[in-house]
Amino acid sequence: MRADGGLNGLKILHLESMATLAEPKRQVSAEEAREVAEAAREEQWTSPSFVRELFLGSLRMDLIHPYPEQDPDEVARAKPFLDKLERFLREDVDSDRIDREGEIPEAVIQGLRDLGAFGIKIPREYGGLGLSQLSYMKAIELVSSVDGSLTALLSAHQSIGVPQPLKMFGSEAQKKKYFPRLAKGAISAFALTEHGVGSDPAAMETTAILDDDVWVLNGEKLWCTNGTKAELLVVMARTPSKMINGKEKKQITAFIVEMDWPGVEVVHRCHFMGLKALYNGVIRFTNVRVPKENVLWGEGKGLKLALVTLNTGRLTLPISSVAAGKRCLEVSRRWAAERVQWGRPIGQHDAIAQKLGTMAANTLAMEAVAELCGAMAERGGYDIRLEAAIAKLYNSEAGWRIIDDTVQIRGGRGYETADSLRARGEAPVPVERIMRDFRINLIFEGSSEIMHLFIAREAVDKHLQVAGDVVMPGKTTQQRLAGLARSAAFYGWWYPTRWLGWSLWPRYGEFGRLAKHVRFVERSCRRLARGVFHSMIRFGPKLELRQSVLFRLVDVAAELFAMAATCSRAQRLYERDRTTGARAAKLADLFCRQARRRVRSEFNGLRRNEDVPTYKLAQEILAGEHRWLERDIVELPE
């Protein structure tokens, strides 16, 4: 992971998440990286954002409550497809075989094509199913409950592959040309990462040079999911810079590339800890001639296209995390009820009961967050860049904890493979495969660290707009004076109001037993806003270097968002069915109680922490001063 773009360049960091394999040949300065990052940002907030308001100290429950429900007509349209998909997954998919052989049988891929699973959101006029974002997420939830490799195949194709950016930014001619192929099952992929370029696209080495009416593409892309199976790619490449206001502006452009074109080559298929049938590889482009009409959106808009696409595209991972949580809850509930030790089922022992209760409460919260974000994307009128990022961050982290607890509850059987369990006559419960397959979710489409940085950059955006000329380096005296006047006008009103507000009974009484938690969210969001402001004052421009501080603030916002979403969803369930709703309220109450403890801990950590000595010690380790601790092992080769 690279984070040298500074606070102004943090947003771009969510594009990729793994450490780079080698330094890029083309060295890029921090300033250049920052400029590329900022140029790709969505600078304006033209629609409301619940999480942005949280960071500013305002609880806008009207944006998420009543909890949005899916359109009944859409539910009816999606039901036949979802029913067929569920039956297909149950009867025709052998996930243990896929894991064992590292291949998805062609019959399975063709079966998905026949169902229309590769064109779920592609409009009907182009041959797709024309279903909504929530219907797509319901489909992904079903698939994820069975096999992670199938989820990766379908989501890499539809969430970040050609269909989503084509739907959002493609020309009518491009849609007519490619949507029908994609809807029939032409697999697509997204190519951005390179050997020396992960989170810093400014160092991109893949180039496209215009030769008359054709772009000539050269370069190599790494970790291209679906790349070894795809017919179509979205490829990001560096195109010639432009001079704007006398200053050079770097250009990165998105292209639709066909895999059977001359010069496109699959160099290597990558293999991983989990997702054994992931069709991920290294793709090389040698003098590939790309027609001018295959530029997506426009020259120089590639990174912004990727960022906007990911706002919706990354909602796949939160819902797949929900599926993992539900599967683990089912496995753990059954095992904890039937496994008897010391004269009673293990679920009646407090150590296991604590895990089960927490697991169920967190699964409800994950579902509330994921489906709320999906509903926001489906309805439109919201800016969900922060909500989607938190959903990805929060659900992948919570899902991992649930899986870890499930392995512990199952004990040796959780660590044993399904094939081995089957061979000795036990139920082939694939907990260890679930763990291996899921681990990448904390890395895919923005690692947890990158998501924290991205969210933090957006969290301070308003403050940078108001006071950036005061706190950021490189500003003129005139700019600083103007910034001071602007800051005095804004903070003179804003800051005192972050201390004031009625967050006591009877406010939010419509939430019943959960009202106290909603009131806690309101009090805490004002404290969060003060925490962001105080951190900017305390650290100034060096706040970009204090990532642990930023992470704590982001974690508070994530917990508050999850609490608000969970309370809203539980209330909606109660209105629909009082029996189920009362049970949901119990889970929501437990979740919020535990979340409140985590929030208080993060707030306390803003002032009481070991960040500085830990960082200093890490630098000593990097300098080799503590290699003595690595003695008495077989040393790795250099």
Image: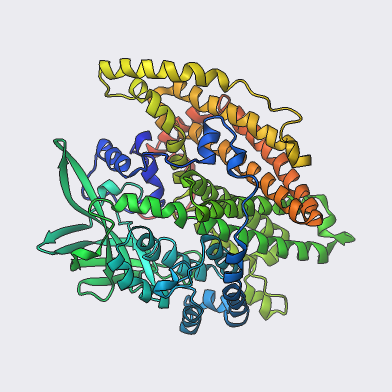
Front one among 364 and 82 = 82
Front one among 503 and 435 = 503
How many marks the image carries: the answer is: 0
x 18%, y 59%: residue: 208
Front one among 637 and 449 = 449
Residue 2 pos. (x, y %) = 36, 44
Would residue 300 be found to the left or right of residue 561 on screen?
left
Tell me, yes or no, if residue 229 can be seen here.
no
x 64%, y 58%: residue: 325
x 36%, y 39%: residue: 43
Report which quarter residue 38 is drawn in: top left
Residue 118 pos. (x, y %) = 45, 72
Name of the residue lying farthest toward the left:
212
Residue 292 pos. (x, y %) = 19, 63
454 versus 223 height, above or below: above
Name of the residue lying farthest toward the bottom:
107
Would residue 202 be found to the left or right of residue 615 on screen?
left
